[in-house]
């Protein structure tokens, strides 16, 4: 099908202010923002700007958000696709899609290309998932490698890719000149969770007694995506109860609901 070749956002509104915690990761990607904004500053002494970096961490921890924020901070377009879209694709389609993406990206440079779930196409060769789907996945991976090698480091295209399985990636992807930088994005600790709560509490009408520190203490193991979910659920629960503001009881119920959802999901996986 011709639909949804990849996503392109020309004006990204997300900035680092939308990404809570992740201080070290933010420091590292700030460098990439500088490469995009003033490439000549870095190349004038003969240095080569890196082509890509790998964001490594569990689901829902803000990898996509951070990649978008890089584009937002640099004021450049954001192209994205997900490796999982390439699974079970017809012969030649994946490779053609990768070529199309890079063609457009080069035209719109400077820009960010984001590949979510890169492990779905970048699994080491021979380590198959679905028999038959494998050859096409290898074609797609090869075309990605060819594209990465084919553009100059001063082309202004920087590729960010996300994975929670760096261990299964084909070593060809990690070679110098490809994804030779890894940035780890971990689940937030209590301080990180409080910061993420503060971002997602902003649009919500809160009871003055509400304490983000307590919310952070009650959500061990939660990733940012789950915290965002809790805040939204709490607002909906309070509204259903015809309250004027969202209070701790609403949050407690929202946390229970999100934990219940996670337990169900885990049961299905087991
Ligand atoms: P996946 O691997 O499942 O694609 P991801 O790591 O890319 O997950 P995101 O899609 O970036 O995670 O996060 C989902 C949502 O969770 C974000 O849009 C945001 O609302 C919230 N979120 C996650 N991490 C953070 C964070 N550090 N600060 C603020 N919000 C966050």
Image (cartoon, rainbow, N blue to C red):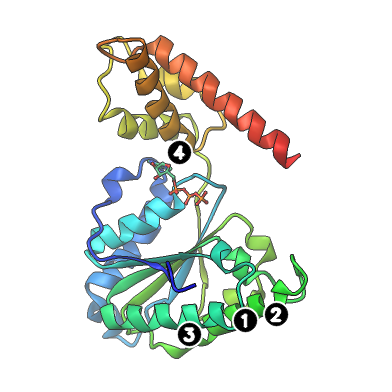
Q: Is residue 260 above or below residue 53?
A: above
Q: Which residue is mark 1?
A: 91
Q: Which tag is nearer the camera, tag 1 or tag 3?
A: 1
Q: Under tag 2, what secondary structure?
A: helix
Instruction: Confirm or reject: label 2 Cβ below 8 Å from ligand 1.
Output: no
Q: Are marks 1 and 3 in contact (CB under 8 Å)?
A: no
Q: Earlier in the sequence, mark 3 or mark 2?
A: 2
Q: Is mark 4 within 8 Å of ligand 1?
A: yes
Distance of mark 3 from mark 2, alpha carbons?
Answer: 18 Å
Q: What whole-number distance in Å separates the C-alpha atoms at marks 1 and 3?
A: 18 Å
Q: Are marks 3 and 2 in contact (CB under 8 Å)?
A: no
Quarter of the image that includes the C terminus: top right
Residue appearing at x 72%, y 34% in the figure: 267
Circle nearer the viewer, 2 or 4:
2
Element at label 3: helix
Gap between marks 1 and 2, in whole Å? 8 Å
Residue 188 pos. (x, y %): 49, 37
Callout 4: SS = helix
**What residue sits right under mark 4 in the picture?**
224
Residue, x 49% and y 72% (percent of image)? 1
Question: How dense is the environment of label 3, judged by Cα within 10 Å: few (below 14), some, or many (20 and up)?
Answer: some
């Amino acid at each position: 099908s011709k639909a949804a070749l990849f996503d392109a956002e020309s004006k990204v509104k997300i900035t680092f202010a939308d990404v809570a915690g992740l201080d070290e990761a933010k420091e590292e990607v700030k460098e990439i923002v500088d490469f995009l904004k003033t490439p000549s500053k870095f190349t004038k002494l003969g240095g080569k700007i890196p082509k890509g970096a790998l964001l490594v961490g569990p689901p829902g921890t803000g990898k996509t958000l951070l990649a978008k924020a890089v584009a937002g901070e640099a004021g450049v377009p954001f192209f994205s696709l997900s490796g999982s879209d390439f699974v079970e694709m017809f012969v030649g389609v994946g490779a053609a899609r990768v070529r199309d993406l890079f063609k457009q990206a080069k035209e719109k440079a400077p820009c960010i290309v984001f590949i979510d779930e890169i492990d779905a196409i970048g699994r080491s060769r021979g380590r198959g998932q679905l028999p038959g789907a494998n050859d096409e996945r290898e074609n797609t991976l090869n075309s990605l490698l060819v594209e990465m090698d084919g553009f100059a480091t001063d082309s202004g295209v920087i590729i960010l890719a996300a994975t929670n399985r760096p261990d299964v990636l084909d070593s060809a992807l990690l070679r110098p000149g490809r994804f030779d930088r890894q940035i780890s994005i971990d689940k937030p600790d209590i301080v990180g969770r409080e910061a993420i709560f503060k971002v997602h509490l902003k649009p919500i009408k809160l009871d003055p007694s509400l304490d983000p520190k307590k919310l952070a203490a009650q959500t061990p193991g939660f990733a940012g995506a789950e915290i965002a979910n809790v805040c939204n659920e709490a607002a909906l629960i309070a509204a259903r109860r015809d309250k004027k503001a969202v209070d701790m009881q609403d949050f407690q119920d929202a946390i229970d609901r999100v934990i219940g959802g996670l337990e169900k999901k885990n049961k299905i996986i087991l």
